[in-house]
């Protein structure tokens, strides 16, 4: 399975936002600078996370993005599906019933074994991503990582801003 590069971007950006102090925000431009990404395209991807309730966005001098709910409630699957959707990357087109090798209809009453295996693999992938939250990811980082992230974010763009609530 190959996902768009923007999937990596939003996973890292959400993880970065999860490391900020509660209520702090970071702008799309700041996150883009932090990861050397194109800001306009990143902003569109971050808006998909806002629409999914994963992030919240505020405008104004203290505006930016922050987590829309606690990191313990945001799974990797939710982030991936917010930008890439939840449909399976495999689509069976029943080619077993076409061409010189076509099977008779009576041999195709059941779902194609390959389609079934691909669906099983997709569900296993989804289950795996659903098991891990942003909080789990943060907990697996070296203990110094959140402070390092906050310090480095403070040197990019305008730095994280304290805002009301989280």
Image (cartoon, rainbow, N blue to C red):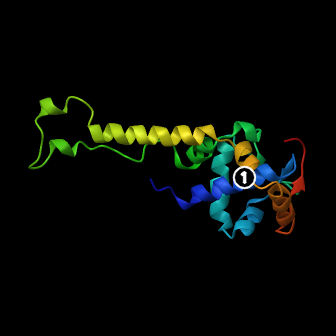
Q: Residue at x 52, y 58 (%)?
A: 4
Q: Quadrant of residue 26?
A: bottom right
Left or right side of 25 for 136: left
Q: Quadrant of residue 109?
A: top left
Residue 65 visible to the viewer: no
Q: How many marks?
A: 1
Asked if 124 appears above or below 142 in the picture, the reply is above
> Which percent across, then down, holds residue 40?
66, 64
Q: Secondary structure at mark 1?
A: helix
> Which percent across, then down, holds residue 19?
80, 52
> Which percent across, then down, holds residue 62?
88, 54
> Which percent across, then down, holds residue 94?
23, 42
Residue 134 visible to the viewer: yes
Asked if 4 appears above or below 85 in the picture, the reply is below
Q: Residues within 10 Å of mark 1 (few under 14, many from 20)?
A: many
> Which residue position is annotated with label 1?
15
Which quadrant is the C terminus positioned in? top right
Left or right side of 109 for 38: right
Looking at the picture, tell me which residue is in the foreground, 120 or 85: 120
Q: Residue at x 8, y 49 (%)?
A: 100
Looking at the picture, tell me which residue is in the foreground, 146 or 40: 146
């Amino acid at each position: 399975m190959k996902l768009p590069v923007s999937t990596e971007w939003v996973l890292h950006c959400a993880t970065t936002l999860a490391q900020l102090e509660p209520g702090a925000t970071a702008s799309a431009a700041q996150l883009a600078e932090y990861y050397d990404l194109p800001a306009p395209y990143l902003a569109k991807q971050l808006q998909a996370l806002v629409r999914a309730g994963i992030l919240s966005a505020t405008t104004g001098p203290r505006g930016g993005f922050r987590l829309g709910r606690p990191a313990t409630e945001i799974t990797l699957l939710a982030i991936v599906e917010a930008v890439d959707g939840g449909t399976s990357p495999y689509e069976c087109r029943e080619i077993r019933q076409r061409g010189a090798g076509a099977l008779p209809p009576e041999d195709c009453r059941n779902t194609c074994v390959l389609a079934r295996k691909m669906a099983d693999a997709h569900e296993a992938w989804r289950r795996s991503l659903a098991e891990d939250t942003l909080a789990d990811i943060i907990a697996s980082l070296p203990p110094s990582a959140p402070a390092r992230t906050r310090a480095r974010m403070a040197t990019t763009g305008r730095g994280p801003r304290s805002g009301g609530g989280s």
